Image: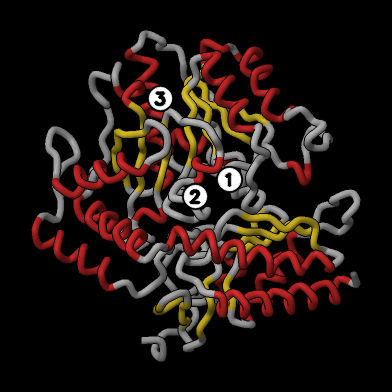
Amino acid sequence: MSEQVKKMDETSHLILHRTTKDEIRQGVTVITRGEGIRVTDQDGKTYIDLDSGVTRPVHLGYGRKELAQAAYDQMCELAYFTPCQFANVPAMKLADQLAEIAPGEINKFTFECDGSEAVESAMKLAKHYHYFRGDKNRYKVISRRGAYHGVNGIGIRALGTVMPMRQMMEPLAPGSVFVESPYCYRCQHNLRYPDCNMACARDIERIIEFEGPELFSMFIGEPIMQGFGAYLPPPEYWPIVREICDKYGILMVIDEVICAFGRTGKMFGTEHLNVKPDMITMAKGITSGYIPLGAVGCTDAVMEPIDVFMHLHTYGNHPVSCAVAIKSLEILKEEKLVENSAAMGEYFLEGLKSFTKHPSVGEIRGVGLWTAIDFTTDKNTHAPFPLKNLVSMVNRAKDKGVITKCMGMALEFAPPLNIGKDDIDEVIRVLEEAITEEEREMGL
């Protein structure tokens, strides 16, 4: 197949997401196959996939025939049935399994097609919760600048990064309220941790009071933020948010779309936070990207007042997707990939810390197999780093056989959870070369 395929150009009938016409004219790489942690392009060139399919879902690596078999077997038995007024075995079984491992008191689940739909469904569940309790005016949602929570319908209101994706679709439904993120390396309050007294968290209460406490439905945030590149907030942050949400009757939703299922060295990113959420959203690693699936989990307390969830997606609770998720969770446990994520994440982070000698490297950080290098042109002031130079580093790494990406002013890494030390050593070598070459080009 790879010998017959050429790079995609403007003659193709395919529409790509977030890809410019200029990039298409130059020719877009076509990935034709994958095996383990590596993928192969149209010319037969093989790359280490350092971001699990770039959008990070491929936790188990490529070529997992067990997942294909699970999908095939379920298709033969029951390919589809509606998610309303009928149930199916895989969806029920998956919900039971998630109830056993989910953080806090999360034990009720509904399944969607992806993370964007999961976030939208969480917003709808929150609105239902308040509506059936008599608080019908609660519609506002608190999100954070720099956050990414998908791009569907009402869910796009919480999008705090990649701004054109939201701005082009405006005017949106009202109710978006944004607060500052806990991005200590470049604090938007111009303070320094720990002397800041967690101003970014405490300021949420001021904004709630200003906007009207009786109008708020939920607060949503990632346990570890992707928008700046794998950023875990200080340990005080989330308990303060939890306290504020409780004070004003606001549901706290933790977006686990990226973090869940081992990415951070624990089954769920929430396990790093010392808080109990009212809801969580999930996707990506739940099926390792082999088939679309997202999920929302909530507590009994959220579901108790809701008489009926007035919501319908044709492919909700899809039996085939749920069957693949069940097999994916089985592999995750049998091969101890969550534990491998913790061990290899620590090994990877130690390798990355050797880059601190570079004049452009500002901060090295990470949790499990989700790590990042935040770049700067001035280590004292943490001055912004040009995007064009980050993109150039990504291209240099790709030329050398490693696919990675930039987030904010960082290079971000989230490889499949079955990566080993030899692969990490190769990645460290390539990244070292890419950074050195770019710094030389910049005159640093």
Question: Could you tell which of marks 2 and 3 lies nearer the N-terminus?
Answer: 3
What separation in Å lies between label 2 and label 3 (alpha carbons)?
A: 22 Å
Classed neighbour count for the residue bearing mark 3: other residues with Cα under 10 Å, few (<14), some (14–19), many (≥20): many
Residue 117 pos. (x, y %): 38, 42
Measuring 70% from the left and 67% from the top, which residue is drawn there? Answer: 352
Classed neighbour count for the residue bearing mark 1: other residues with Cα under 10 Å, few (<14), some (14–19), many (≥20): many
Quadrant housing the N terminus: bottom left
- Callout 2 secondary element: loop
- Callout 3 secondary element: helix
Res. 224 mark: 1
Q: Mark 3: which amino acid?
A: Ala
Q: Mark 2: which amino acid?
A: Cys
Q: Nearer the viewer, mark 2 or mark 3?
A: 2
- The residue that disc 2 covers is 259
- Callout 1 secondary element: loop
Measuring 31% from the left and 34% from the top, which residue is drawn there? Answer: 107
Residue 315 pos. (x, y %): 24, 46
Quadrant housing the C terminus: bottom right
Residue 11, visible in the rendered structure? no
Measuring 33% from the left and 55% from the top, which residue is drawn there? Answer: 292
Residue 378 to residue 240: above or below: below
- The quarter holding residue 21 reads bottom right
Res. 349 mark: none
Contact, mark 2 vs mark 1 (Cβ under 8 Å): yes
Of 261 and 310, nearer the camera is 261
Of 243 and 212, nearer the camera is 243
- The quarter holding residue 443 reads bottom right
